[in-house]
Every structure is written in structure tokens, then in C-alpha cells.
Amino acid sequence: MHPILKDRARLGTYLLGWVPVALLLLVAGRTLGWTWLGSTLVALPLAILGSGLFLTSWHLCRAFPLERTQGRGRWPAWLMAALVLGNLWAGCGWLIAWGLGRFPDLKVDPRAWSTPWAFFASMGTLLYLGSLALHYVLAALEQRRTSERTEQELRVLAREAELKALRAQLNPHFLFNSLNSISALTTLDPGRAREMCVLLSTFLRTSLRLGEQGSVPLSEELELARSYLAIEQIRFGSRLQVAWEVDEALKAVAVPTLLLQPLVENAIKHGIAQVPEGGLLRIAVVPHGPYAEVTVENPVDADAEPPVGLGLGLQQVKQRLQGCFGHHTYFQTRIQEGRHTVVFGIPREPKEAQP
Amino acid sequence: MTERTYTALIVDDEDLARAVVREHLAAHPEFTVLAECANGFDAVKAVSERKPDLVFLDIQMPKLDGFEVLELLDPQPVVIFVTAYDQHALRAFDVHAVDYLLKPFAADRFEEALQRAKARLDQGSPTRLHATELSGSARGDWPLDRIVVKDGAKVTLIPLAKLDYVQAQDDYVLLKTPEKGHLKQQTLASLEQRLDPKRFLRIHRSFIIQLDRLVRLEQTETESWVAVLQDGTRLPVSKSGYARLRETLGQD
């Protein structure tokens, strides 16, 4: 929508800007020897006409946005439009003067108008250019405001995804199943029961601590995954094997907190737990250009119908990545030969990460 | 008076979870554990072959979940669900489970469940429902995403996306996929209840089709229509089926 017309205050200011123009025209009329009334009857309509006519520079402003079109291409367009509309405007002035010429009392003489034609035409041309400049400024302001708004919306989305992720963090079924395993072990193998109590406490304590932070070193996320998987290995026994492949140099990279955990939980819930013989869960962190690339790979039931689109958990991880890193990240999933893989990139430069 | 003995089967994909049940059950010499199963397929096979009186059944398992296992068993054994998920409790009552134990459970809670199971077993067979009754009862509330079929010892899962149409054949339904047809003991009406009406439509007393398989309708004579499916199959459309089709497709 037109940036001036949509806002009353702006429109008022813009019209106020035309008052000096009207006064100038009035003086010009007086100089040509027209009566006060005659001069006013020319100046007022012409100023009003001009204010409306030059609003059309908005279209030119939109056709040649400053940030996209480059170089000189737009200069001829600007000048041409300014000359045409400037002369058109001056022509309208002559038409009004010609009309008023029928009333001799006003002493308005159209011939007196055509003599200083160049004056009126250049005045129109300059006014048009001025209006054009104004529109460019307004468009730039507008754009900044929208980009600020989208950025803010993105941040809100990321924040929401974060909160949801944290809330889902205390996965009750994981707790109940672990407690059930402990309940079994108390008579079967008291030592392991105690070990599992300790593992479970470590996991809970770590996830509560991480939940309070905005971003943490990748090493902390990996530690959490390690303690989680140690518990699940007791639960699933030989069905769960875990392979780690972590580049030590990347352990310090900053990541949004509890980003990895939902992926690892997914790998168990929708992967290992659905395959009778279980399989290998692989977690890898390797350098990939300016990114630390994280991979979580797990077997899936080959007979099951592949899911349509991303599940809620994966979607939240993707949203959080985008919210934190904008375009400086990527996130991909695929299912191939009975294995589900999630791959994403985190910028290695810590500056890029926002808390 | 000698006490009656019972046979039991434990189904859970986690070793430790099975161990807890086994341990609690060991305090009751009148119960003999016939077998333990780690997934739904094995459970269906073991129950059919060994006919236990009582089954301890987990719900979340690979391949077949506990409800799908139950659906494939005919006649139905007495079942105690053992699960960490409390949201399936209502559905468990619908399939006439004796009890629903939440993991981890206390010893006296297990006792209670076992006493209930014994009481039902001692009543004799009337509580043993048959699959057809079961699928025709209050099961309509739980929408399907796949259909389980048992053919002899073989269990097949049919994802709904693969289903072209369903044909009623007496007490059975014929489930037609591009590869083959599967017979299942169920009525067309009870199956219809559990299918998404936006995806599946009953076009005739004996036929339900997956709507996106429909290519066109042909008029054979006045008030008589034939549905032509993607693979060229021609199925009769009844008058009320035609009205339903028009209503459903007209909304798009």
C-alpha cells in the first residue's frame, strides 16, 4: 500500500509541504500582473493537482528499488518521469490559466504563463524529483520496520520451540520405563540397580542444569546424550549399540541448549524401540566447511510406513536452529536402506551464535 | 481340594520388564509361564500355538502393538496390560482387559490384577470374546492407521495407503491391495467405523473404496452406476452409495 496515503499524519505532513509551493505560485501569478483572486484560482488548484499527481512517484520507486537494481539504469527513468510529469503539471497550469482567461476581470493571461514556461516546467520537474526522494526514504523506513518485525517473529517462534522442547524434556515415559528397569534390577542385580539410580540422577541433574542456559558448548550436549544412552542401554540390553565419532576440536562449539537430546530420544523411540533386533545408533560430529556437522543415525522398521513430513520433535529442532543461526545453518533428514538420518550444521564461529 | 493351575505368557520387548512380571508370578506356583515373547509377531504365534490362560501384554512394542496382537487372537485369552503409558487405559477396557498395570507397579497391585484374572478364568469361558464380536463392539473410537491380518501363522500389516478397496464376504472382509487380497475375519460395518470417512467411502452394501483410487463413475443404465478405479477394477455403486459419493466429492 502507498506509504503516504495509508497514514493520516503522513498525508497531512505531505500536504503541508505543498503550502509553500502554492504560495510561490501565488507570487508568480502576482508577478505576471494577475489579480489576487486570479492568482489564487490558478495557484490553489495547481498545488492540489500537483500534490496528487506526484504521489505517483511511488510506482517508480517500487519499479526501481534501490537495493536490487544497480547502477545507472534508474537515472534515465527518474529524469524521464520527472520531465514528463513536470511538463504535464506545467501544462495543467496553462490550461487553468487559459480557462480563467475568459474572465477579463481576473487579468489572467495564458500567454503570460507560456512565456516563463521553462520556470514552471523545471519547478514541476524538481518537485517530482523531491517527491520521488521522499518516497524512497519512506520505502526504506518501511522495509526496515518489516524486516525487524519478521526477525522478531522468528525469534518468538524459536523461543516458543525452545520452551516446548524444554517442557518435553522431562519425558515421563522414559522415567517410568527406567524406574521399571530399576524395579526389576533390585532383586536381579542390586549393584546394577544402584548404578542405574546414579545414571538416572546424573541425567536428570544435567538436563535440569542445561535447561536453565541459553546456549552451551557441544561437549555438554554430548555428555547428556551419553548419560541418557547409558540408561537406555540397560533398558534395551543388546538391542542398543552406540557408536560415537566426535571431532575433539568441535566440542567447544556453542549450541542452543537441549538441541541434541530430542534427536537422540527420537532415535530410540521411533528407531531402536521399533526394531525387534535393535541396531546401531551412530552420533557423529565432524567439520564441514564453516560448520560443525552433527549426524544422528538409527535403524528404523523397514516394513513400517515412512512418516509424512517432519515429526513435531524434528520440526522444533529445525525451528530452533533457524531461530538461533538464521541462514547460517542447515537441517536435513532422510530414510535410506532401513536407516533414518538427521544431519545439521552449527556455525563454528562462536560469534554467529546468539543466546 | 487341589487348586486349579493356570498357564501364562509374558509379552514385553524389554528383558527387564519381563523379569519383573516373572518374579512376581513366581510367588504363585499355580501359574506356569509357558513362554516369553519380545515382540508382537512372536506373541501372536505363541498364543495361537500354546493357548495360555493369561497373557501379560505390553502395548508399545516393535512390529505389532499390544492391541493389534489382541485383535489377531481368536479366541481371546484373558489379558492384563502392563505399560508405562496411562493414556491407553480406556481403550484397554474396551477390549475387555482384566486389568491395566502401570509400570513400575507395586506388589499388591500385581496381586490384585492376578486375583481378578483368576476370578475371570474360574468363571469359565463366557468372558472369552471372539475377534468378530470384539471388532464389532465399542472399538469404533480408535482410528486405524494400518490393518493387521493373520493368515495361518503369518501376520501381515497393511498400511492404509496401500488399500484399494474392501469387499464384504460373509463373516470376512477381503482387503484388496495392488499386490493381493487379504481375508480378515471382521464385518464391513465394524471396519467402516474405524476408517477415516474423508479417505474411505462405502459405495455399496459390500464395498468400501479408498477415494483417491476412484477415476470415474460410469452410468450403465438409469439410476445404476459403476465406480472405475485406477487399476481398472469396476465396482457396483448402490443408490445410497452414489448419494454419499456425490456429497463427499461435491464438497471439494
Image: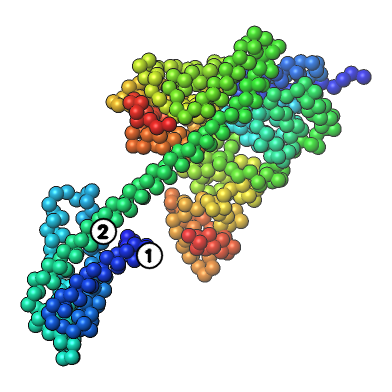
Residue B111 location in percent, x, y? Answer: 80, 23
* Image-quadrant location for residue A20: bottom left
Labelled disc at residue A135? 2
Residue drawn at 71 percent across, 45 percent down: B137
Quadrant that contains the N terminus of chain A: bottom left
Q: Residue furthest top?
A: A191
Viewer-proximal residue among A185 and B141: A185
Residue B161 location in percent, x, y? Answer: 49, 43
Q: Of circles 2 and 1, which is in front?
A: 1
- Amino acid type indicated by mark 2: His
Residue A260 location in percent, x, y? Answer: 46, 27
Labelled disc at residue B187? none
Query: Element type at marker 1?
Result: helix
Viewer-proximal residue among A293 and A306: A293
Position of B175 relative to A128 (above/below): above
Residue drawn at 54 percent across, 32 percent down: A166
Viewer-proximal residue among B84 and A43: A43
Disc 1: which residue: A8
Whether the residues at callouts 2 and 1 have beta carbons within 8 Å, the answer is: no
Earlier in the chain: of badge 2 and badge 1, it is: 1
Residue drawn at 37 percent across, 63 percent down: A9
Query: Element type at marker 2?
Result: helix
Color encoding of the figure: rainbow
Residue drawn at 87 percent across, 20 percent down: B3
Residue A55 location in percent, x, y? Answer: 26, 66
